[in-house]
Image (cartoon, rainbow, N blue to C red):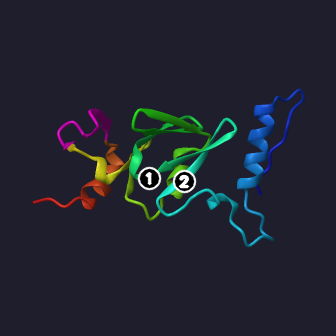
Amino acid sequence: EHVTYLVKPFNERTLQSSVEFALRTKDPHSEEKVETGYILEDRFFIKVGNILQKIYFTDISWIQSEGNYSIIYAGDRKYAVKLSLTRMARYFDGKPFLRIHKRYLVPLNKINSIDTNNNQIEIENQLIPIGASYRTDLMSCLQKL
């Protein structure tokens, strides 16, 4: 069972995070999955301040873990989402994304090159490391001639 609590004095941001956490937690008596409420076939919405921002899966360059946050890099923008990369990856099940490092989740179609000597990939001129335990999964997803 998931539990959250507020410690006084609390601010608006703490209250908002606690409410959002409660909404994401599945009620065992409910048939509705609140967690996937913002995800559509080709896009999803994240909360930026008081606005729900639409992000297309195809616009994502990569997602990087920063502690309890996941940073979504999409074009020249980046969005911080208060979800671990492990939880974030669950939202991408069935999509062409792959975890290639403990801190990185990438769309396979954005990979420009793979440096097998240095264990890194290149996406949009950014070098991203390949974790040793993720290398086999990455290589098995690729078509090589």
Give the amino acid at mark 1.
Answer: Phe
Q: Farthest top residue?
A: 9
Segment colored magenta: 114-129
Q: Farthest right residue?
A: 8
First along the sequence among labels 2 and 1:
2
The relative height of residue 8 versus residue 93 in the rendered view (above or below) is above
Main SS category, magenta section: strand
Q: Which one is in front, 139 or 9?
A: 9
Going by the image, does 133 lie left or right of 15?
left
User: Which residue is under mark 1?
Assistant: 57
Quadrant position of the C terminus in the picture: bottom left
Callout 2: 10 Å neighbours few (<14), some, many (20+)? some
Q: Residue at x 73, y 47 (%)?
A: 20
Could you tell me residue 35's position as x and y percent? 65, 58
Res. 6 image quadrant: top right
Could you tell me residue 40's position as x and y percent? 54, 61
Q: Which one is in front, 129 or 10?
A: 10
Callout 1: 10 Å neighbours few (<14), some, many (20+)? some
Say if the magenta span includes residue 118: yes
Quadrant position of the N terminus in the picture: bottom right
Query: How much space separates mark 2 and mark 1, taking CA atoms?
Result: 8 Å
Q: Secondary structure at mark 2?
A: strand
Could you tell me residue 98's position as x and y percent? 38, 53
User: Which residue is under mark 2?
Assistant: 44
The relative height of residue 62 versus residue 35 in the rendered view (above or below) is above
